[in-house]
Every structure is written in C-alpha cells, then in structure tokens.
Amino acid sequence: MSFSNYPQSATNAAKKALRFKEKNGSSCGTPVGWTRASQLSSRKALSLQTVKRTFSFLSRAEVYNQGKFTDDDGKEICGSIMYAAWGGTSMRSWCKKIINEEKSMEDNKEIRISTNLEVRYQNSDDGEKQTLSGYAIKFGDVTTIGDQFRERVDSTALEGVDMSNTFALFNHDWSTPLGRAGRNMNLTVDDEGLRVDLELPQTSTARDLSELVKNDIVGGMSFGFTIAEDTWSRSDEKMPLRTINRIDKLYEVTFTPVPAYPTTEVALRSMEAATAEEDTKEILAELNEAQMEAQTPNLEPQQEERQPEPTMDVETTPQDKPLAFTKVDALKFILDHQK
C-alpha cells in the first residue's frame, strides 16, 4: 500500500531545503534525509513503512526546528533544514493521520476465504498477457466461521462501496502487490457476487502465482474488508447467523490456497454485542412478566387446615443448599448495585 496524497506544503518545505543545499552546499543531514526530500519534492508515492519512519523522525526533530535555516551569524541550523527536508509540521500531522487510520483499519479489518471457487487461468492469443479470473465474494452463500457462527454476504453489501483503491495480492502480502483496481484489475458486481479479472504483471510473484494456478495448487480467493452494517439472527440452527448487509471498505482481494475459514475478533465482538442485546431484552421481558404475576391477586381458595411441611433428618439435610438465581434476580442485583 502506498500514499501520495501528502500536503503540498510538505512538498514545498522539501523543495526549500533542497534549494538551500544546492545554493549553499549544506553539510547537514544524511543521504536518507536528502533522499526523502527528493521523494517529497517530486511527490513520489510513499510506503506505509516510509510514512512511519517519516513520522518518527519529525517527532524527534521537531524540538530542533527554529523556523529558519541560518542563525544571526549566518551559520546553518541543521535541525531546521532537515526538519523541512522531511516535510515539516504539515507532513508530521499527515503521517500521524495516516498511521492512525491504518491502525483503525487493521483493528477492524476482517479476512474471509471464498471457498469452492474456481480461479481461471487464461493466456492471450499472443502469449504475452495472462489473466486470472474468479469470484472473491459469493452473495448468499452461508459459511460456518470457526465453529462459532454462520455468515452470509447480502446482495446489497457492495452497493455504493468505493473499490477504486482495492489491491490484488498473493497470500495477503502487501509487499508484492499484483494489481490495483482501474489499472490491471477489473472488479465487477453481478448477481453472483464480486468478480475479479486480473491481468498479471511481469513480476516474479505474478509468474509464480500463474504456475501455481495453472497446476491447480492455488484455486481460492479471499477478501479483506471492514463492516458498515451487519445483523445477527437465531433460527433452529445451533449457531447464530451473521448477515453482512453493507461493506464499508474493500481493501484487498487475494489469490490464495484455501485454508480453514478464519474466525476474527471483530466478528466475535459484533456477535457478543448482538447477543448481549437480545439477552437484555429477554431479561427485561422476564422481569416485566414477574412483576405482572406479583400484582395479580391470588384467587385460589385458602385451605381451612394447613398441612404440615415435610421434615428431613438433620443428618441428611444439605448444609449448603444452592439457591435458584434467575435472570430476573441477576438484573435486580445489577440495578440495586448501580443505585
């Protein structure tokens, strides 16, 4: 994943530092720092690792920035020069934003394997272009996730989803991307699901994948996404059913061997929240029913003679008899302690 939408002011700061060096022959900085300045001045795309390194440097170097390149005696201020070379304050703020967004994405991102799919391999007539095609998402298919719950993707899940920045990967490896939507990959939503058509680039990873697919070693696809809306339901099945109604972002489609369908912490958190809400409704309904029963007068005729209660031998009477503790008791206990 790469980023090139950093602020123009960061580019201007890097250019200013480069002009100063060219004019005055500055001895400040390191080759890495001046390489970064060249990248920013020409607005080259930066990897996530480079964004993190830039943020780390600017956070440490900010204290040395005096806002000017020379002091009153005309001596260069290296802290200010290199702070600008790395993009300055606006670059630091942008890097922080990107890092936080990526962390949030990783915390909420889910990976799903599309099982029982055929990845097709096709050679062009001239033999130069090779295309892989398959479905990364199949609408309506119900799959069991890690023996925890069942899941299906609704046919409306991809409506309005921006897939212009979706990447094609091999085994979820972002270091060697295979393609990008709108470049060498077409993503098409039809009645069946999300179809992927990838024209393989001339890279070693793409050639390896081509051979693996051609020899039926790799034949599955998966997708990495975050959720905008899902619902949970219970039926006669033992496990709850999660329906993905709307996907927020589609980050990747991946060609991969088909392993076991993964369970994700994100989905389990969603399930726990949904089931907790159902349990609360059930408890409240039970409490309301108990209160109604308490308010209903007892219309049964009283017995004229009270029957003696059966007694038990002291030696056989359990000393620590367990108490019945219902959901109603639990809710009353919680409410009392909240007061």
Image (cartoon, helix red, strand yellow):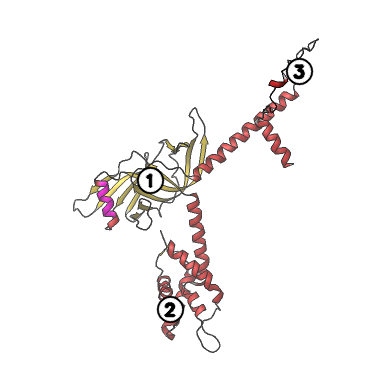
Q: Residues within 10 Å of mark 3 (few under 14, many from 20)?
A: few
Q: Amino acid at mark 1?
A: Ser
Q: Amino acid at mark 2?
A: Leu
Q: Nearer the viewer, residue 216 or 128?
A: 216
Q: Is residue 246 magenta?
A: no
Q: Which residue is mark 3?
A: 298
Q: Is residue 89 visible?
A: no
Which numbered disc covers residue 18?
2
The CA span between labels 1 and 2 is 45 Å
Q: Position of residue 93 (x, y in %)?
A: 53, 66
Q: Amino acid at mark 3?
A: Asn
Q: Position of residue 52 (x, y in %)?
A: 47, 64
**Range of residues picked out in magenta:** 206-213
Among the two numbered marks 1 and 3 on one chain, the one whose residue lies closer to the N terminus: 1
Q: Is residue 210 magenta?
A: yes
Residue at the far left: name it. Answer: 126
Q: Which residue is mark 1?
A: 222
